[in-house]
Image (tube, helix red, strand yellow):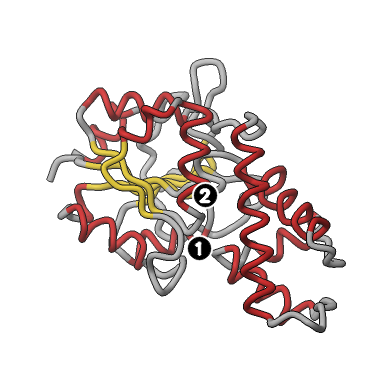
Amino acid sequence: MSLNALIFDVDGTLADTELKGHRVAYNRAFEQLGIDWHWTEATYTELLVVSGGKERMKYFIDNYQPDIPSDMVLETLIARIYSSKTQIFKDMLLTGLIPLRSGVERLFKEAYQAGIHLAIATTTALSNVQCLLSSNLGEESLDWFDIIAAGDIVENKKPSGEIYQLVLDKMGWQADECVAFEDSENGCLSARAAALPVIITVTAYTRDEAFIDADLVLDRLGDENDPAKVINDPDGSFKGQMLTVDYLIERYG
């Protein structure tokens, strides 16, 4: 089959949102709500083994046993923190504090102009995705995507393949005519669970992960003045300084 669609994760893949984005927003939400929690970089790195913000907080509570307000039902507390954090993060996006990673805008435009479909498959909130795209690329960029599958629309988060399978099923696409883009081992496992080939662009948080069965691992997609570096290329097919649609078509048909 010929290449039909590119499916992108968001956090870490499209933008380096974790260290200076989500972590900061969580800490501001804790302060805003008067909760005596603080996530250091080291703590947050450990929490990233869990996909999904609400699930990450539940994991933090179960494993770190922080103080919890005695008058608050746990589910209500998590929902309130998540709501506050989402608004704080959205404000950060709208003020341009979180740019897209190197090569992302270029690859979007190359694919769109070549008639290759674009899609999003992420566990982050839909509003986060919309704000990230519109603040960096303009409101019209939302129309570039055939589907933006985001948030709590599947029962099981990554590394489950449900979010990717949902995209495939809704769009009627076959896995072997698509390529997934991820930044983490959980994301890689999720894409492979849906039988998708997957290309990884690592972050500082994920550089040392295994990325089992990834087709290609780079440090970034790259641009002319910001070349990509190969971390792992099992078949030796990547020769350029940036990942292009021409390369994808040549590799995947």
Vertical placement of 77 versus 10: above or below? below
Q: State the image coordinates of residue 200 (x, y, percent, origin top left).
A: 47, 47
Q: Quadrant of residue 143?
A: top left
Vertical placement of 29 versus 71: above or below? above
Query: What residue occupies the far left of the structure in this picture?
Result: 1
Q: State the image coordinates of residue 45 (x, y, percent, origin top left).
A: 71, 59
Residue drawn at the location 45% of the way across and 51% of the way down: 126
Vertical placement of 245 versus 54: above or below? above
Residue situated in front as seen by the camera: 137 or 217:
137
Decide if residue 75 is on the left or right side of residue 174. right
Residue situated in front as seen by the camera: 128 or 4:
128
Identified by mark 2, the residue type is: Asp
Query: What residue occupies the far top of the structure in this picture?
Result: 225
Q: State the image coordinates of residue 108 (x, y, percent, origin top left).
A: 37, 30
Give me the disc on residue 75: none
Quarter in which the C terminus is drawn: top left
Quickly name the residue at label 1.
Answer: 186
Label 2: few (<14), some (14–19) or many (≥20) C-alpha neighbours in 10 Å: many
Q: State the image coordinates of residue 98 (x, y, percent, origin top left).
A: 63, 35
Vertical placement of 94 versus 50: above or below? above
Q: Secondary structure at mark 1?
A: helix
Quickly name the residue at label 2.
Answer: 183
Query: What residue occupies the far front of the structure in this picture?
Result: 71
The Cα–Cα distance between marks 2 and 1, rounded to whole angstroms, is 9 Å
Label 1: few (<14), some (14–19) or many (≥20) C-alpha neighbours in 10 Å: many
